[in-house]
Image (cartoon, grey):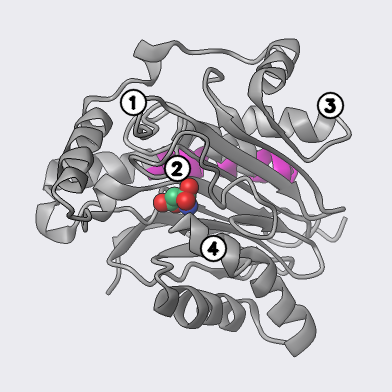
């Protein structure tokens, strides 16, 4: 064990409420949710725990909070259902686990981890994914548990606008996601991401979140990344893998590589959103190309930093 300072970053999605619509009460509630999740992840790292456990703990806290689009509070498909995607990846050996389109487990990120730890596969969907959740003893919620009025209203509004041929330009109405990346004291990195996807997505649509190398990535040799934004573009530009590739092949720093992918690759190609990223030295980068990204970070010995908008 090299015993270096740990580092942790979290995001609650790039689909932030527009600054013009934010109220002090709402802002306080979002910051509170971020603070709680950051503390849950940091508690693991402080005890000398693994990055993988820290990102799982942080994402569970965000999934449990109905303000964020993951777990409780997930957005609705065109048919008024919730279909959740999640992924974990361990930088020690690039093991990964993911689920797509699941409804039931309160913490889809735990199910993603069960896929990684209990099966020889990377991604599971359908009834067998839920069977695994039961076998792993995961807690389930019902429709009432997952229901939030604001997400339901967002679906109605989006469908109304679509019927008129208009596209919603409100990022809070459109999407969101939660995620965490960490580097532990042993210098291992991990990433976890969980989402309800995009409001009024087609049933069966799978975004970038459960796709290793797109919305989630971790490799000790380079970095751990969790993305949020227009998932289709993150998939086509292999966002997470591209950041790692720029570091590995071009010798770019984490900050340079992450900035390039978010600002030059995703941004100009309809890929609104951002990433949080950490390398095995504990450097952090949190670039985004839109109005805001709910986010927080902490490095051992420093005070936590929470933010929503850009400068
Ligand atoms: N990336 C997510 C998805 O496409 C949504 C988001 O982060 O806003 O499913």
* Foreground disc of the pair 3, 1: 1
User: CA–CA distance between discs 1 and 4?
Assistant: 25 Å
Which region of the structure is painted magenta?
34-54
The answer to whether mark 4 is within 8 Å of ligand 1 is yes
Q: Earlier in the sequence, mark 1 or mark 4?
A: 1
Q: Which residue is mark 1?
A: 80
Q: Residue 234 has which mark?
A: 4
Say which of 307 and 47 sits in front: 307
Taking the spot 19% from the left edge, 57% from the top edge, the residue there is 18
Q: Residue 197 has which mark?
A: 2
Q: Earlier in the sequence, mark 2 or mark 1?
A: 1
User: CA–CA distance between discs 4 and 2?
Assistant: 13 Å
In the rendered image, the quadrant that contains the C terminus is bottom left
User: CA–CA distance between discs 3 and 2?
Assistant: 25 Å
Whether label 2 touches label 1, CB < 8 Å: no
Mark 2 surroundings: few (<14), some (14-19) or many (≥20) residues within 10 A: many
Q: Residue 72 has which mark?
A: none
Mark 3 surroundings: few (<14), some (14-19) or many (≥20) residues within 10 A: some
User: CA–CA distance between discs 3 and 1?
Assistant: 32 Å
């Amino acid at each position: 064990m090299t015993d270096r300072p740990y580092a942790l970053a979290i995001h609650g999605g790039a689909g932030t409420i527009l600054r013009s619509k934010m109220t002090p009460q709402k802002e306080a509630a979002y910051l509170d949710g971020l603070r709680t999740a950051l503390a849950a992840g940091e508690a693991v790292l402080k005890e000398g725990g693994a990055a993988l456990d820290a990102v799982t703990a942080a994402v569970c806290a965000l999934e449990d909070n109905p303000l964020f689009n993951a777990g409780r509070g997930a957005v609705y498909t065109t048919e008024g259902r919730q279909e959740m995607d999640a992924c974990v990846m361990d930088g020690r050996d690039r093991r990964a686990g993911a689920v797509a389109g699941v409804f039931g487990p309160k913490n889809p990120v735990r199910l993603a981890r069960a896929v990684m730890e209990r099966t020889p596969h990377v991604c599971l969907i359908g009834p067998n994914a839920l069977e695994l959740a039961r076998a792993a003893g995961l807690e389930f919620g019902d429709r009432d548990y997952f229901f939030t009025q604001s997400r339901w209203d967002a679906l109605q509004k989006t469908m109304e606008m679509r019927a008129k041929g208009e596209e919603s330009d409100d990022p809070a109405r459109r999407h969101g996601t939660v995620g965490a990346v960490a580097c532990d004291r042993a210098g291992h990195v991990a990433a976890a991401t969980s989402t309800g996807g995009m409001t009024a997505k087609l049933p069966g649509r799978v975004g970038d979140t459960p796709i290793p190398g797109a919305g989630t990535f971790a490799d000790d040799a380079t970095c751990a990344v969790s993305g949020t934004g227009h998932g289709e573009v993150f998939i086509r530009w292999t966002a997470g893998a591209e950041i790692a590739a720029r570091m590995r092949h071009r010798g770019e720093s984490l900050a340079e590589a992450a900035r390039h992918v978010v600002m030059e690759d995703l941004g100009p190609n309809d890929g609104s959103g951002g990433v949080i990223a950490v390398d095995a030295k504990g450097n952090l980068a949190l670039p985004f190309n839109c109005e805001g990204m709910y986010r927080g970070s902490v490095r051992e010995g420093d005070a936590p930093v929470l933010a929503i908008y850009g400068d």
